[in-house]
Amino acid sequence: MEKVTKYLGIDWGEKRIGLATADSEVSLALPLRTVSTLAAVLSAVKEEEIDVIVLGAPKKMNGAAADNPLWQDFLVQLRERGGRPVELADERLTSQAADSLEGSEAEKAQRDEIAATLILQDYLDEH
């Protein structure tokens, strides 16, 4: 029997970080929660027994990498402290889909989780 791989999808933002989970058995991404710090992300990695982290990578619509030093720092810290492989996934269209939702701050937090879910599902579908 093949080991089930657990994934954590991340939609990074300066104020909020959306998280989603999935496993290789079902391959269906589900929203987890919204956090605001790397420490909270690392806690989720431990709690959820994550094997692979999938981080949404900001790109311009032409496909070029978006230059965001804060995101770059988050990526470096996640790779150094996460203890798990970090895969990058194009987040361009997932962010737009999640941004089409309007509403309160609580709904914005949910929107970040939805974006993380879309990022992770796209990754799972491609792999």
Image: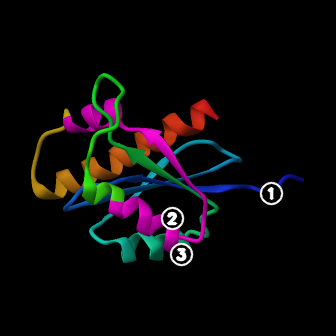
The answer to whether residue 33 shows anywhere in this view is: no
The answer to whether residue 90 is magenta is yes
* Residue that appears at 60% across and 65% down: 84
Report whether 60 appears left or right of 116: left
- Label 1 and label 2: CA atoms lie apart by 23 Å
Q: Which mark is residue 47?
A: 3
Classify 74 as above or below 31. Answer: below
Q: CA distance from mark 1 to mark 3?
A: 18 Å
State the CA–CA distance, disc 3 to disc 2. Answer: 18 Å
- Residue nearest the observer in this picture, 91 or 21: 91
Q: In the figure, 62 relative to 2: above or below?
A: above
- As drawn, the label of residue 79 is 2
Element under disc 1 = loop
Answer left or right for 10 relative to 36.
right
Q: What secondary structure is marked by label 2?
A: helix
The image quadrant of residue 34 is bottom left
Label 3: few (<14), some (14–19) or many (≥20) C-alpha neighbours in 10 Å: few
* Image position of 52 (left or right of 42): right
Q: Residues within 10 Å of mark 2 (few under 14, many from 20)?
A: some
Q: Check residue 3 in the rendering and tell me which mark sits there, or answer none.
A: 1
| Label located before the other in sequence (3 or 2) | 3
Res. 121 visible in picture: yes
Q: Say if mark 1 contacts mark 2, CB within 8 Å.
A: no
In percent of the image, x 58 and y 32: which residue is there? Answer: 125
Give the residue at the far top of this rendering.
62
Classify mark 3: helix, strand or loop. helix
Magenta segment boundaries in residue numbering: 73-99
Which is the main secondary structure of the residues drawn in magenta?
Answer: helix
Q: Nearer the viewer, mark 1 or mark 2?
A: 2
Q: Earlier in the sequence, mark 1 or mark 2?
A: 1
Q: Amino acid at mark 3?
A: Glu
